[in-house]
Amino acid sequence: MTELRKRMIECLQLRGFSERTQEAYVRAVRQLAQHYKKSPDLVTEEELRQYFLYIKNVKKYSRPTTTIALCGIKFFFERTLGKQWSTFDLIRPPREKKLPVILSIEEVQTILRQVRLPRYRVCLSTIYSCGLRLQEGTHIQVRDIDSGRGMLHVRHGKGGKDRYVPLPERTVELLREYWVTHRNPAWMFPSEGRVHVELKNSIEPMHKSSVQHAFRAALKATKINKAASVHTLRHSFATHLLEAGVNLRLIQEYLGHSSPTTTSIYTHLTARAEDLGRQAINRIMSEL
């Protein structure tokens, strides 16, 4: 590790950023350095300006990816190097108003049935039934499962926040059935790692990429023509709860959203909302 990278990580730690954010910010600076093939502290303000034009017009980064690049690089120059450049005031990631892909309950069931290995099937089932983010699902610890209360303790969610979410009885059964196959004392979904360590003795959780690969393979096998991902299960969970009449404020708490505005997007995605819209349009057209 270079002294410069070490210093940036120390600055990020002092500001209280999570490990995931630290990794993302350091990666953004590394990509800038790789682009110009030199140490990032030697990049000029004009080169920085051209780099952001490059990722916008050539690489065509999405808003989230551009935001991470901007925040990481800005932090490096302003906090680690102490440079206050006006270029950062010009850069504004484009606003996007995309609605997430939603799977029906039947489509979720179809996809999960196609997941071949139990560890991935149980993990994905838990992610859906508890509305978890991918890393929240892979990092479940045995101590997080409160079967007596029917609750799951989600640790270190987005923004470093903990929360409790309801744990369905069927999900508890699936977790128990899978756990007895490895009996790891810490992790619910332990990783074999590169050396294929015995799961009982593993000291780290299953990697996110392997779960993503399993989901993509299952989706492909179903021939469901939707651009779905593991995160789609979380969106679908929220939408299905709303369709079932669960209060939006409660769904916000389950998802760990700080703002109700974030959760309110699901009101546009329910089948009930679509039906009401369709009925209104039909009524208008019948009067023309």
Image (cartoon, rainbow, N blue to C red):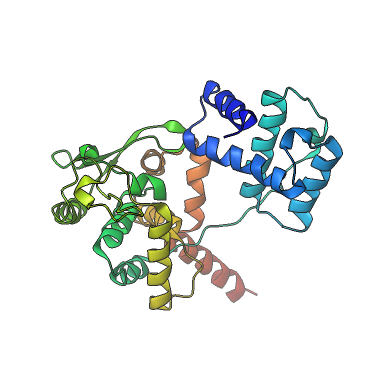
Res 246 seen here: no
Name which quarter of the figure residue 39 lies in: top right
Q: Out of 188 and 258, give the one closest to the viewer.
A: 188
- Residue 282 horizontal/vertical position (percent): 55, 72
Q: Is residue 105 above or below residue 244?
A: below
- Residue 119 horizontal/vertical position (percent): 26, 59
In the picture, measured across the screen, residue 250 lies left or right of residue 189, that is right
- Residue 77 horizontal/vertical position (percent): 72, 30
- What residue is drawn where x is 64% and y is 36%? 72
Q: Quadrant of the N terminus?
A: top right
**Total number of numbered labels?**
0
- Residue 99 horizontal/vertical position (percent): 56, 57
Q: Quadrant of the C terminus?
A: bottom right
- What residue is drawn where x is 41% and y is 53%? 208
In the picture, measured across the screen, residue 102 lies left or right of residue 54, that is left
Q: Is residue 151 above or below residue 236?
A: above
Q: Out of 207 and 269, give the one closest to the viewer.
A: 207
Q: Out of 199 and 139, give the one closest to the viewer.
A: 199
Q: Out of 153 and 200, give the one closest to the viewer.
A: 200
Name which quarter of the figure residue 70 lies in: top right
Res 233 seen here: yes
Name which quarter of the figure residue 154 lies in: top left
Q: Is residue 90 above or below residue 179?
A: above
